[in-house]
Amino acid sequence: MDVVFNQLFAGLSMASILLIIALGLAIIYGAMGVINLAHGEFVMLGAYTTWACQHYLGFGILLSLPFVFVVVGAIGWLIERTIVQRLYDRPLDTILATWGIGIMLQQLVRIVIGPESRFVSGPDFLRGNLEIGNVVMSNYRIFVIFFSIAVLLATWALLTKTEFGTKLRAVIQNRSISECYGIESKRIYSLTFAYGAGLAGIAGTLITPLFSTIPTMGTSLVVDAFLVVIIGGLGSIIGAAAAAVMIGELTAMFSLVINDTLGRIGVLACVIVLIRLRPRGLFPENTRG
């Protein structure tokens, strides 16, 4: 039983990372209808920015978080303004363009920094474990879980309680009418894309003590994040949270009962069945009018 609880905790911590990544994807798709295949590379850029902050500036992970959010968000804003903004209402072109951007970012990191794995140490005060009986919980993973909840609540507040959120919802419902009322839809789209990219960068920062920091690190993570968005319901924040926990825990339990490879197959089989039963996801939203 203790092994089960340990595995459930590991699955919950992984779900927390997936949630932050998927939130960015859900917001970008919900607002703009853009399937961003470069989202995993934003995670990777966040990890490498964290490494650079620690290696060259001596910043810890916590001190790096706001810096990473701004840097990766700015990169996302630049990509949206120069490329993505010209491809709205052309979904296939957008998919191909963001896929190409992702490859370019990976190769740029390989050339500038190198393909070798980089190490980032976690905060000193979060080292060690919390032990309750035979259940061992990493202090850092506990921090990641609570931090992801804070990000979820902050994102919900941004979208529902602020002027920016009101304008974003107006643009989602009807872009042309909202522009008649003076809302600059292009500016809203750019800021939304930048926010989604910044969230991916934060996720990259948080996973640096847990994953190897390499140019391809975001590829597998973004696949799981896409599954979270699809299962939760495209554009749904509540759905993304529920689906992240579901996939994280299913992955952990399947890995315990069988093995990682077959466990992965089991998770995908469950996803296929769920999509068959609920093709619009657990909490579908009318994202674009």
Image (tube, helix red, strand yellow):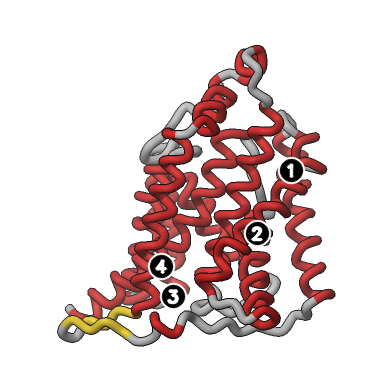
Give the mark nearer the N terminus: 1 vs 2. Answer: 2
Mark nearer the viewer, 3 or 4: 4
Task: Give SS at disc 3.
Answer: helix
Which one is nearer the viewer's eye here, 62 or 222? 62
| Residue contact between numbered discs 3 and 1, judged by CB atoms under 8 Å | no
Label 4 is placed on what type of residue? Val
Q: Nearer the viewer, residue 12 or 197?
A: 197
Left or right relative to 59: residue 150: left
Amino acid type of disc 3?
Asp
Left or right: where does residue 113 sit relative to residue 259? right
Name the side, left or right, on which 31 lies relative to 105: left
Q: Residue at x 65, y 18 (%)?
A: 182
Which tag, 3 or 4, sits closer to the chain's start? Answer: 4
Q: What is the C-alpha distance between the residues marked 1 and 2?
A: 13 Å
Q: Secondary structure at mark 4?
A: helix
Pointer 3 residue? 260
Q: Residue at x 39, y 85 (%)?
A: 127
- Where does the N terminus fall, quadrant-wise? bottom left
Circles 2 and 3, Cβ within 8 Å, touching? The answer is no
In the displayed structure, 201 sits above or below 277; it is: below
| Image mark for residue 129 | none
Q: Between disc 2 and disc 4, whose residue precedes?
A: 2
**Which amino acid, mark 2?**
Phe
Q: Residues within 10 Å of mark 4 (few under 14, many from 20)?
A: many
| Residue at 77 percent of width and 71 percent of height | 109
Q: Is residue 233 among the parts visible in the rendering?
A: no
Residue 288 in the image: x percent, y percent? 55, 26
Query: Is there CB contact under 8 Å for labels 4 and 1?
Result: no
Mark 4 vs mark 1, CA separation in Å: 29 Å
Residue receiving disc 2: 42
